[in-house]
Amino acid sequence: MPKIIFLPHEEICPEGAVIEVESGTTICDAALANGIEIEHACEKSCACTTCHVIVREGFESLPEASEDEEDMLDKAWGLEPDSRLSCQAVVDDKDLVVEIPKYTINMVSESH
């Protein structure tokens, strides 16, 4: 079973986490099922960027992003070449190392 290694995030998972996940599960669903409260303002419908993550290792094992996801990612705070919306990124059979950005677009727009 593949693992997702979440790098430490000051508020969401200060210690980081290593979780086992079934192939075919999204990064967001895996995080939520394991107590990592990643924001998902649009209820995982690819209509916002609050679940934006950066896949530091294993990015190439993920299915290609859809055009809708690419369009949404253009609006994400801290966008990087290996950025994905965690609600759309489906885990295959490879381990992933995932970083949750410090801010979401909601936090930036609300001046946190």
Image (cartoon, rainbow, N blue to C red):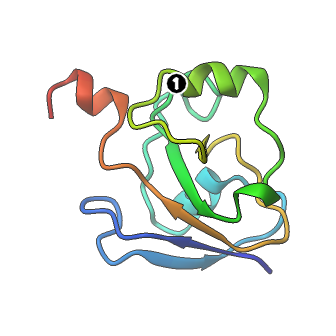
Residue 6 lies, in percent from the top left, at 49, 69
Rendered position, 27 above or below 35: above
**Which amino acid type corresponds to the residue marked 1 in the rendered image?**
Cys
Residue 54 lies, in percent from the top left, at 53, 51
Q: Residue at x 83, y 65 (%)?
A: 23
Q: Which residue is mark 1?
A: 48
Rendered position, 15 above or below 24: below
Q: Is residue 99 left or right of residue 105?
A: right
Residue 50 lies, in percent from the top left, at 45, 35
Circle 1 — which element?
Answer: loop
Quick one: which residue is furthest to the left in this view? Answer: 111
Residue 108 lies, in percent from the top left, at 25, 28
Q: Is residue 9 left or right of residue 95?
A: left
Rendered position, 20 above or below 112: below
The image quadrant where one finds the N terminus is: bottom right
Q: Quadrant of residue 110?
A: top left
> Closest to the observer: 29 or 55?
55
> Closest to the observer: 92 or 21?
92
How many dots with numbers? 1
Q: Residue at x 32, y 63 (%)?
A: 9
